Amino acid sequence: MDLWDIFDKEWVPVGAWVEQFLNWVVSNFRFIFQAIKVPFDFVLSGLEDTLTGAPDLVMLAVITLVAWQAGGRRLGLISASCMLAIGLMGAWEESMTTLSIVLTCVVFCSIIGIPLGVVAAKRDRFWYVLQPFLDLMQTIPSFVYLVPIVMLFSIGNVSGVIVTFIYALPPVVRLTNLGIRQVRPDMVEAARAFGASKRQTLYKVELPLAMPTIMAGVNQTIMMALSMVVVSSMISVTGLGQMVLRGIGRLDMGLATVGGLGIVFLAVVIDRVSQSFGISARDRGHKKWYETGPIGFLRSKILKN
Amino acid sequence: MSNAQIECRDLWKIYGANSQKAMEAVLKDNLTKEEVRDQFDCVLGVRNASFSVKEGEIFCIMGLSGSGKSTLVRHVNRLIEPTSGQIHVAGQRVDTMAEPELRLLRAETIGMVFQHMALWPHRTLGENVGFGLEVRDVPYEARREAAIKALEAMDLSGWIDHYPDQLSGGMQQRVGLARALAADPEILLMDEPFSALDPLIRRQLQDQFLELSAKLKKTTLFITHDLDEAIRMGDHIAIMNDGEIVQIGTPEEIVTNPKDDYVAEFVKGISRVSLVHAETIMEPLEGRAATNKTIQTGAELSAIIDCFLDDQEPLTVVDPDGNSVGHITIKAALTALRG
């Protein structure tokens, strides 16, 4: 062998190892992964049945009202027109499926990501260990783990949620960690000085003060989940992504465009609504949430009578 | 010490991973701050501090930034763990106390005011002030009532449902004070409470606090970097430098008898007219006949100078029983004024 071309030979057969390992896991531990699917399946099918099962106009009204409540009248109007556009283009059913996948993903990313972020903010060593995993999850091309996911979890919408979950989890962990670390130390010290326990300090001072940053993380997670819609449609996840994929496959530009526009409109709505959840009370003029939006409107009507 | 509310004995704080080893070495070889830093990579925060604060008095700790005064005061409610030494607060030993008792002590016995207010911006004033009660699960109505009372005492009655950022700096620090007083603690720790305020507001708050303090008689540990403030507020003053307490005394003792150059440097610019008293500067009578021009013991230097405005005859100092105890010449008065 020529010493100059030493790397012509594959010295470390990583590919073969991974394949063997994966086959071994699939044949011995598939039941574990099927069990992991259960909670995802539960939340997803519940959401999907509700969103697609409800009459279209009712859903349109609900989304408009939620947007109005979250971000004021202007956001209500923007959301109504975006959703109306989706409906008129004939992508309503698909957009509801995509919405339910994204929401499921957000639920699990928050449930798992926020506590991880809190622990990471409290323990430096945990944070150092966690960081490379988050980097890996964010940077490894999603096509790479698409196949193993299919082998372990099979195809379908639930697997789509899991793929999306892996990709979208890091921002919420990172920003929760950052948010908690950025709380002014004298705020925490004051809480301790008045006799608060660690838990009380976390819930009454640190989490509320970190909330705008945490919500920015949730918003990022949502955006990343949306960007996975088309990729995950390759493992036969239905919804807007599938429209795009099918359009590309058949060179049907019309169908692809409708799907693409649908994703854009849906993204605008979800992004704006989730961003306005993160606005601090100070910037809302110190009004309680029930004093604004449609609920505030109703409340003032009722209180007047 | 029978009536000491706060007492610290031989308190040391060394920051860093090797603090225990550094502690032993310091005790053995009496290392300086720099030697501790170079040999053990540790920072000496507080060096062998001992002091006691009597019930109802205001005890000022004065020093420049980095002198360890904030570190020292945080040992009293153990926001900072001492490396070695004893802390007694209100009859309880704090340095060995278990976590639940410590939390109770912080919530019930010690109120704290912070330099930058440290009010929680997401809570209304009522919720800020009632926090100490909230963490002890006091019901809402009682908390609200205590908050109303505490805010009233600070002239902030109408603001209970507003948020801290709607208030000016001076008002915010009054909220800080109200928060410290809400649980009616025996002890107040004040960490440079008025330093971040402009001079006029600072003066007002000092007066308001002195008035309140005369009424409530809280034992107060007051941190400041301003000797004028320390003299105005304190019954006793401890002066700190490089983590060490250099001198403890009444304002008059500190000003008239500074222990070393460091303290003398501080005292230089301080006006003595209301600090120095007749008995401090009088000379013994030594057979001299008492003059008709008399002044009571305890009279301030300003009053003595007033007596010399018309003529320059020496003054005779008399005690409350009418006995002549000494005399003051104009020279002595002017020397005392110069310092």
Image: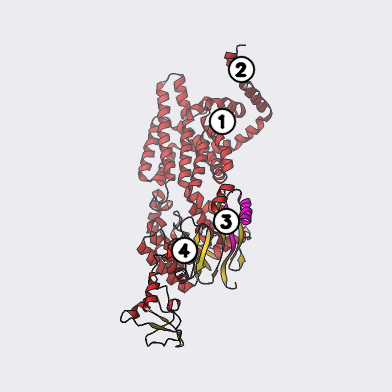
Q: Is residue B273 visible?
A: no
> Which circle's residue, 3 or 4, is located before the other in the chain?
3
Q: Amino acid at mark 3?
A: Lys
Frontmost residue, B153 versus A279: B153
Q: Is residue A62 above or below residue B123?
A: above
Q: Identify residue for label 2.
A: A10
Q: Chain of mark 3?
A: B
Please, which residue is most extreme toward the top here? A1
Badge 1: residue crowd in 10 Å (few <14, some 14–19, many ≥20): many
Residue in the foreground of this view, choosing between B79 and B297: B297
Where residue B231 sits: x, y (%)? 44, 68
Amino acid at the residue labelled 2: Glu
Disc 4, disc 1: CB below 8 Å? no
Quarter of the image for the N terminus of chain B: give it: bottom right
**B146 versus A120 height, above or below:** below
Disc 4 marks a residue whose amino acid type is Val
Which amino acid lies under the numbered mark 1 shown in the image of this protein?
A: Ser
Q: Real-space Cα distance between discs 4 and 1?
A: 73 Å
Q: Is disc 1 placed on a helix, strand or loop?
A: helix
Read off the residue under disc 4: B263
Residue position marked by numbered label 1 in the rendering: A159
Q: From mark 2 to mark 4, how far is it between C-alphas?
A: 76 Å
Closer to the camera: disc 1 or disc 2?
Answer: 2
Whole-percent x and y of residue B50?
57, 64
- Marks 3 and 4 sit apart, C-alpha to C-alpha, by 23 Å
Question: Do callouts 1 and 2 point to residues on the same chain?
Answer: yes
- Judged by depth in the image, the label closer to the viewer, 2 or 3, is 3
Q: Position of residue B97 (x, y in %)?
A: 63, 61
Magenta span covers which residues? B9-30
Question: Mark 3 touching mark 4, by CB under 8 A?
Answer: no
Q: Nearer the observer, disc 3 or disc 1?
A: 3
